[in-house]
Image (cartoon, rainbow, N blue to C red):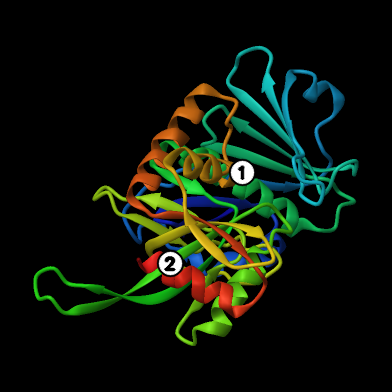
Amino acid sequence: MMRVYYCVAGHVFAVEVSDHMLLTHLGNYEPFRVEKNDNGDDEIFVLRIQKHELLNEEQRSVYSHIFTDNSEEDMPRVELYQDVNNQGGRLIRVSQIANSPICCELVSDNFFTHGVLHIATNYRDVRFCIDNALMLMFAFRTAPLMTLEMHAAVVVKPSEEANSESGKAKTEELGYLFLGHSGTGKSTHARQWLKAFPDAWLLNDDNPILRVMDSGEVRVYGSPWSGKTPCYKNAYTRVGGIIKLSQAPYNELQPLTLPQAYAYVLSSASGLKMERQMADQLYNSIKHVITHVKCYHLNCLPNTDAAEVCFRGCKV
């Protein structure tokens, strides 16, 4: 069994494989690969990957269905089960889209510290299975650690701010998160920023990580998960703004109230929101984020003027 380590948003996790060929499906994780003792931290979880048949009917019979997430038709269907014997085990079954066959099953302990991924023998998109298992393990395991796995696009752009001590402007790169359901235009709006501002760059196009640091600073990190855009940057920056996008025949930016900001950030954060303990953990993280980062609603067209309106408004 071979074990490799990765560090995402400052959290180290391990992947175990018995077949070295499985590592060929982990190319998007290479920028995040570390030696175990690079930062002296123990791994927060270990995922073992096994490519063989799924659980049989007898093995699945010890689990009871709790929840199915199929909120967006073009997104994976995720079914969550709990061990009926209260042994602290969980089963997560994943389909590529609604009504398609189960392609993989993740068996985990109750706290997502140890997991085993079972991939159907006849399923060819091994990377899809590995990505979804690791995203789920990471989101659920880091929820108590003031960390939020987001569904968003992130652009980083230098911004000038006045230095209270010297009175002179200082330049700092800040990350701007664009929220919205699939099809809203997050990637399109991010591209408008890249067109409008030559000094802007894409940090992540689908699943960045928000983390509240011990100092209280809110950072956004790149991740190995970036949707259809191959953008796997091991980098981070302080958050300059969170923007909920809506398509409109005009460009207008408005500040969000705290309840509005909470609702939008919560809907874009991954987690077991039906479970009280994790819901409380998400609440604590989101409450800190929205009280320390400015949040806005942008009605916009798919043009560069929308990017300019958004950036100017975030600076006010």
For residue 311, the mark is: none
Residue shown at the point (82%, 38%) measured from the top left: 54
Residue 61 image position (x, y, % from top left)? 80, 19
Residue that mark 2 sits on? 313
Name the residue at the top extreme.
85
On-image quarter of the C terminus: bottom left
- Amino acid type shown at disc 1: Leu
Q: Secondary structure at mark 2?
A: helix
Left or right of 55 on screen, residue 209: left
- Between the residue at mark 1 and the residue at mark 2, the CA separation in whole angstroms equals 34 Å
Residue 115 appears anywhere in the view: yes
Depth check, front residue: 291 or 114: 291
Left or right of 59 on screen, residue 153: left
Name the residue at the left extreme.
165
For residue 136, the mark is: 1
Residue shown at the point (59%, 42%) measured from the top left: 267
Depth check, front residue: 129 or 67: 67
Q: Vertically, is 216 above or below 111?
A: below
- Amino acid type shown at disc 2: Gly
Q: Secondary structure at mark 1?
A: helix
